Amino acid sequence: MKITQKQILSEGIAMGKVYLEQGHRYVFSEQTSVSREKSLFLKAVRQATEQIDDFLKISSEEDREYLTVQRLLIQDPVFMKKTLLKIEEGALATVGLSGVLDEYAQELKKSGNRYLQERFLDIEDAKERILNQFAQIDQPQMQGKVILVAEVLHPSFLIQHRKNIVGVITQKGGFTSHGAILCRQWNIPYILSPYSFPKEKFLIIDSSKREIYPDPSEELQKTYREILQGLSKEKFEAVSHDGYGFWANVSTNQELEKVMNYGFDGVGLYRTEMIFMNRQRPLTLEEQTEIYSKAVLRLKGKPICFRTFDIGDDKQLPYLKSSHKGIENYLNNPELFETQIQALITSNIYRNLKIMFPMIYRKEEFVSLKNWVLKIRNRMNDDTPIQIGMMLETKEALDHIEDFTEVDFISVGTNDLIEALYHIDREEQSQRMEKYWVDLWKHLRRVVEFCLKNDIECSVCGELASVLSVAKKFFQIGLKNLSVAAPMIRILNEAYREEVLKEV
Ligand code: PEP
Ligand code: MG
């Protein structure tokens, strides 16, 4: 039997058993007991307290007050006692603790005191914090090579289980979602399918045929094993591409090996927020310096562009919830920003490191962030040249591109830009752009002209750069630097052969 699906978000072949992610919270074992629930509760409280202690070390004065209140609440002996009692009476740990904290919250709400009423939110937050620990405790173990089947793909989940996940099937998702971006970077096939498959079922997915095979025959398995062996030997290598830049998008240092082996010119976009994910606390200065320096050394002098952490929408951190990407993240979390910039400045070993700010709307935002970086560099007594540029991914910046004469480089982020211009969700961009291409080319031609006039390097790092027809069009309008996931080198090769070499 085979199931044919329409939408492929990342190409490739995978074989493995189904790992079913049933939403990432509250996955209960059917056979629970009072003692199991008690120990789950105590473990969750301990982990939540440790998490707060980690944040307390790095948080601002203001946050410290609120975190201390939350810590007291979580450790409150009455709260512990009441919850344990509820568990003894037969409640699940999560239900028991929610019940007790909801009672507290109701009492505060009823009080006429405004200060106490506001503490209601602290209780809600403490509750979330403890409940979140259960996801980590009760997630079924992932063993061996698996095909992840889920409703949606959470980037943090993929990062956490990267070693095990060889294929992904979800009900919802889109080409430009961050989960799909990571899958393409890591060569993990990803198909959209409305079907849910039972856990442990053996599957083969073959995205080139758009097919999923549940329970494949021995013979089919053998055929696919051979295909996979052949694929692992396939050579990816950049064709010679004079005057053009083939850049890579990465999210981890592990991908840099491919970047070098495939012959990329350097890294056009390092999504640094991804290395912050799946941790309960931010990375320290030393930890970040180690990661960035290793990346720089691994590139052996080829340029590397680090984007400052870009949190918001589908990318969230447990210690930094953000509804919007952009400068507010840095202004609201100055220590995090300063630590990252210091680590980047220290890692500027070959004097060609680039720092790029995401989601810039106005010239003033860029200038103030650039000055902030230069101030940090001064404070460090460092005068190594460093290039500071921006992503062009908002309508406001596009409309006023001529104002941005102070940038060293621009990288066009089509994923967010198209969402802003045409209100096409990043999930749907590859299907719904037909009506808008002409308008997009008009805008981008203006950007190219501005960059040429002001000697500013211009590239594209959005996902459309890895769609062959679009990559060719970028070359046509003078966008000669494209940044794509490493395995997409073949698209750049093809675009170059078909669009540039044809003219020779
Ligand atoms: C973009 O918006 O095009 C981009 C490259 O950034 P991200 O996909 O990480 O938002
Ligand atoms: Mg973006």
Image (cartoon, rainbow, N blue to C red):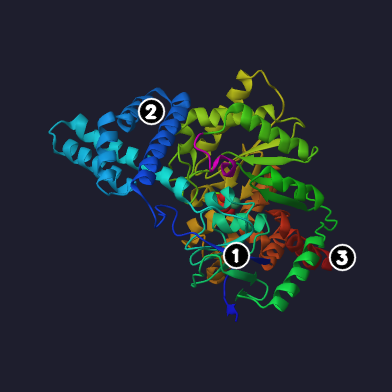
Residue at numbered disc 1: 17
Cβ atoms at labels 2 and 1 below 8 Å apart: no
Residue shown at the point (41%, 46%) measured from the top left: 134
**Label of residue 504 in the image:** 3
- Stretch of the chain drawn in magenta: 273-281
In the rendered structure, which amino acid carries the disc numbered 3? Answer: Val
In the rendered structure, which amino acid carries the disc numbered 2? Answer: Asp
Q: Locate residue 187, reporting x and y percent.
A: 68, 59
Residue at numbered disc 2: 63
| Residue 279 drawn in magenta | yes
Disc 1 Cβ-to-ligand 1 distance below 8 Å: no
Q: Provide the secondary structure element on which disc 1 rests.
A: strand
In the rendered structure, which amino acid carries the disc numbered 1? Answer: Lys
The residue closer to the viewer here, 163 or 317, is: 163
The C terminus lies in which quarter of the figure?
A: bottom right
Q: Which of marks 2 and 1 is in front?
A: 1
The N terminus lies in which quarter of the figure?
A: bottom right
The residue closer to the viewer here, 395 or 471, is: 471
Q: Is residue 130 left or right of residue 365?
A: left
Whether residue 323 is visible, yes or no, is no
Callout 1 environment at 10 Å: few (<14), some (14 to 19), or many (20+)?
many
Q: How far apart are marks 1 and 3 (CA)?
A: 50 Å
